[in-house]
Structures are given as C-alpha cells and as structure tokens.
Amino acid sequence: MMAPEGFLTVEQVAEKLGVSKQTVYRYIRLDGLCAHLRRGHERGRLISSAELESWLKSQYGGADGTQD
C-alpha cells in the first residue's frame, strides 16, 4: 500500500523503528500513537510523519526513538 505524502503505513513505521507490525498496532492501541483509518480499496491505518516524530519525542525523548 502506498501512503499519501506525509503519512506512513504501519509496515513503514515498523521498518523505521525496527519493530514488528504487531508492536506498531500495540503502540496505537495502548500507547497513544495516533493513526488514521484509511478506507476504500487500500484499507489500513496511516500514521502522520509529524505525529510519529512527536509521539517518539514524548515517549523516548528523541525523534529516532533514542534518548537525547
């Protein structure tokens, strides 16, 4: 699935963070990572790149998932 500009798929977020797709879904469900539901032919969840960066900073202190 291709994500619109400025958004990432769950698969892309998992790859970027080095975690499984299930872990990303857990972040969405339990840890407050905001995801938008994509409807239509290419269903799935999309995560805004800006919201991911903000969430990483709030959780870990750094945009790449590491402490500052």
Image (cartoon, rainbow, N blue to C red):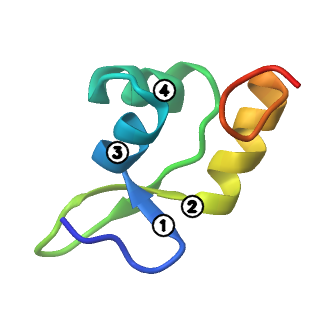
Q: Between residues 41 and 68, which one lies in front from this camera angle?
A: 68
Point 26% across, 69% down: residue: 39
Q: Which residue in the protein does label 1 denote?
A: 7
Q: Nearer the viewer, mark 4 or mark 1?
A: 1
Kindly identify the amino acid type of the residue bearing the numbered disc 3. Val
Q: Which residue in the protein does label 2 denote?
A: 48
Q: Between residues 11 and 35, which one lies in front from this camera angle?
A: 11
Kindly identify the amino acid type of the residue bearing the numbered disc 2. Ser
Q: Nearer the viewer, mark 3 or mark 4?
A: 3
Q: Are marks 3 and 1 in contact (CB under 8 Å)?
A: no
Q: Between residues 39 and 68, which one lies in front from this camera angle?
A: 68
Q: x, y percentage for residue 44? A: 25, 55
**CA gap, disc 3 to disc 1?**
10 Å
Q: Which residue in the protein does label 4 denote?
A: 29
**CA gap, disc 3 to disc 2?**
11 Å
Disc 2 packing (10 Å; few <14; some 14–19; many ≥20)? many
Q: x, y percentage for residue 21? A: 29, 30
Q: Are marks 3 and 4 in contact (CB under 8 Å)?
A: no
Relative to 12, is 5 on the left or the right?
right
Q: Of the numbered discs in the image, which one, if any, rests on residue 10?
A: 3
Disc 1 packing (10 Å; few <14; some 14–19; many ≥20)? many
**CA gap, disc 4 to disc 1?**
18 Å
Q: Are marks 4 and 1 in contact (CB under 8 Å)?
A: no
**CA gap, disc 2 to disc 1?**
4 Å
Badge 1 marks a residue whose secondary structure is strand
Q: Earlier in the sequence, mark 2 or mark 4?
A: 4
Q: Earlier in the sequence, mark 4 or mark 1?
A: 1
Relative to 61, is 13 on the left or the right?
left
Q: Earlier in the sequence, mark 3 or mark 4?
A: 3
Q: Earlier in the sequence, mark 3 or mark 2?
A: 3
Q: Are marks 2 and 1 in contact (CB under 8 Å)?
A: yes
